[in-house]
Structures are given as C-alpha cells and as structure tokens.
C-alpha cells in the first residue's frame, strides 16, 4: 500500500506518495504536521514527531525523493544538489531512509526560503 500526502510549503503545493515500510507508516500516523522548514542547498528539512532507526540508509538520493533523517528525526524533500554534493549528485548530510517520492516537478521547491512553514497532510482516498 502507498500513502498519498499533500506537501504545502509557502506558495508550493504538491502531492507525494510515501512507500509501504515501517518509517513511512510512522510518518503517515503522525500526520498532519506543520513545521518551519530549513533549507540546505536544494533540500528542505524539518523535525517531525517520529523517532525511527534506518532500515536501508542511502548516501545518495534522486530529485523528488522524500527522506527521513534519523539523527534529526527530520523529514527531507530533495530537489537538487546540497552543500555536501559532488557535481550534480544529491547527497544528504548523512545517510537517509528514502520513504517516498514527489508526484510533481521537484524544482518547484527551489522558490521555498528558509523558515517557510511546511504542512504535511493526508490525502483523501
């Protein structure tokens, strides 16, 4: 089963799907979440009320991936290179669990600035 969510960050709104794994289910069960987002290169991240260990940590992710970063209990939206990237790769600060993917154009999040409120909510079936 996949879990459909809506992500709103300032003027950007986009649907996404969370996968069917332990961490994605924990995030789904914690929704809705409203939090001030931080930016780090082309990544938005913010703490969420989920505390889980990684199952399949990844050092590199793809544009549009949604990750969970265990050291900060953080939800991460990746849409381009970060300060840790080499070239055009997308490298988180440290390994993340990929828990889902955006269902739109990831680059739309480039206009979101540090401190913008981000809302995560469940989509109706």
Image (tube, grey):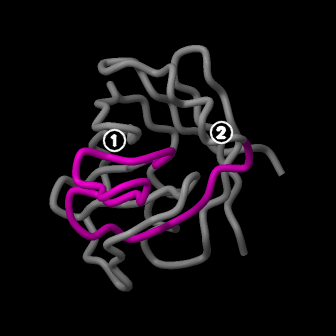
Q: Residue 47: percent from the left, percent from the top?
A: 27, 43
Q: Residue furthest front?
A: 87
- In the picture, measured across the screen, residue 104 lies left or right of residue 94, that is right
How many marks can you see?
2
Find residue 38 and report its image quarter.
Answer: top left
Q: Could you say which disc has been placed on residue 86 in the image?
A: none
Judged by its main secondary structure, the magenta piece is loop
Q: Residue 86: percent from the left, percent from the top?
A: 30, 58
Please state which of residues 89 and 42 is positioned toward the viewer in this rendering: 89
Image height of 95 relative to 93, above or below: below
Whether residue 98 appears in magenta in the rendering, the answer is yes
Check disc 1 and report the residue beneath it. Answer: 45
Q: Which residues are magenta?
A: 77-104
Please state which of residues 68 and 64 is positioned toward the viewer in this rendering: 64
Distance between the alpha carbons at the discs numbered 2 and 1: 16 Å
Q: Residue at x 71, y 42 (%)?
A: 15
Q: Secondary structure at mark 1?
A: strand
Q: Secondary structure at mark 2?
A: strand
Q: Earlier in the sequence, mark 2 or mark 1?
A: 2
Q: Could you say which disc has been placed on residue 6 in the image?
A: 2
Whether residue 103 appears in magenta in the rendering, the answer is yes
- In the picture, measured across the screen, residue 2 lies left or right of residue 61, that is right
Please state which of residues 24 and 97 is positioned toward the viewer in this rendering: 97
- In the picture, measured across the screen, residue 49 lies left or right of residue 119, that is left
Q: Residue furthest right?
A: 125
Q: Residue 63: percent from the left, percent from the top?
A: 55, 54
């Amino acid at each position: 089963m996949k879990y459909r969510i809506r992500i709103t960050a300032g003027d950007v709104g986009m649907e996404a799907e969370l996968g069917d794994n332990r961490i994605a289910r924990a995030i789904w069960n914690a929704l809705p979440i409203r939090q001030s987002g931080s930016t780090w290169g082309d990544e938005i991240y913010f703490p969420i009320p989920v505390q889980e260990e990684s199952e399949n940590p990844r050092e590199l992710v793809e544009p549009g991936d949604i990750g969970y970063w265990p050291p900060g209990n953080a939800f991460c939206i990746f849409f381009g290179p970060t300060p840790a990237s080499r070239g055009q790769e997308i490298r988180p600060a440290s390994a993340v669990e990929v828990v889902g993917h955006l269902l739109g154009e990831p680059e739309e999040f480039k206009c979101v600035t540090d401190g913008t409120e981000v809302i995560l909510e469940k989509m109706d079936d």
